[in-house]
Amino acid sequence: FLGHVERCRVLLHLIDATGDDPAAAYRTIRNELAEYGHGITEKPEIVALSKVDSITADELAAKIKALKRATKKTPYAISAVAGIEMKTVLRAMLAAIDESRQEEQVSPLEAEEAWRP
């Protein structure tokens, strides 16, 4: 599975809001990615707490706070079933992919200078 992840430009890390400890779930996966290596942990990452329609507002606030502390990012709060913030997270993914593509592009002049017979 992680071999396929290597080919991705951007990672969308979904954490189940119905789980007991989203921060621990996040750290577990990040540790597995780090152990695998191959630069996966260096890829741009978007973090989303999913299934937010299944928990109370108080639970959601606490889980977002914990996840924000663990990830150093503000996670998206989404629900595919209820359609909550899906367009927002998809737009964020598209923007991250576009940014990754732009960073990867090399101008013709740079390519010419880099090539040596």
Image: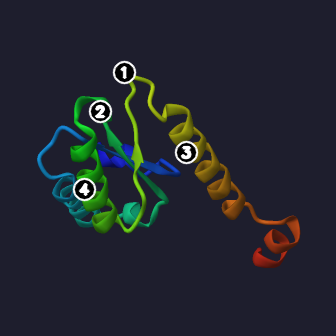
Name the disc covering residue 93, or none: 3
Amino acid type assigned to the residue bearing label 1 in the image:
Val
Compute the Cα span from label 4 to label 3.
18 Å
Q: Position of residue 18 (x, y in %)?
A: 18, 37
Amino acid type assigned to the residue bearing label 3 in the image:
Met
Q: Position of residue 73 (x, y in %)?
A: 42, 63
The answer to whether residue 117 is visible is: no
Q: Are marks 1 and 2 in contact (CB under 8 Å)?
A: yes
Residue 54 appears left or right of 91: left
Q: Which residue is mark 1?
A: 81
Q: Which residue is mark 2?
A: 51
Q: Are marks 3 and 1 in contact (CB under 8 Å)?
A: no
Give the label, 3 or 1, closer to the camera.
1
Q: Position of residue 23 (x, y in %)?
A: 21, 58
What residue occupies the far left of the structure in this picture? Answer: 20
Secondary structure under the numbered disc 4 in the rendered image? helix
Amino acid type assigned to the residue bearing label 2 in the image:
Lys
Query: Nearer the N terminus, badge 3 or badge 1?
Result: 1
Query: Nearer the N terminus, badge 4 or badge 3?
Result: 4
Q: Quadrant of residue 14?
A: top left
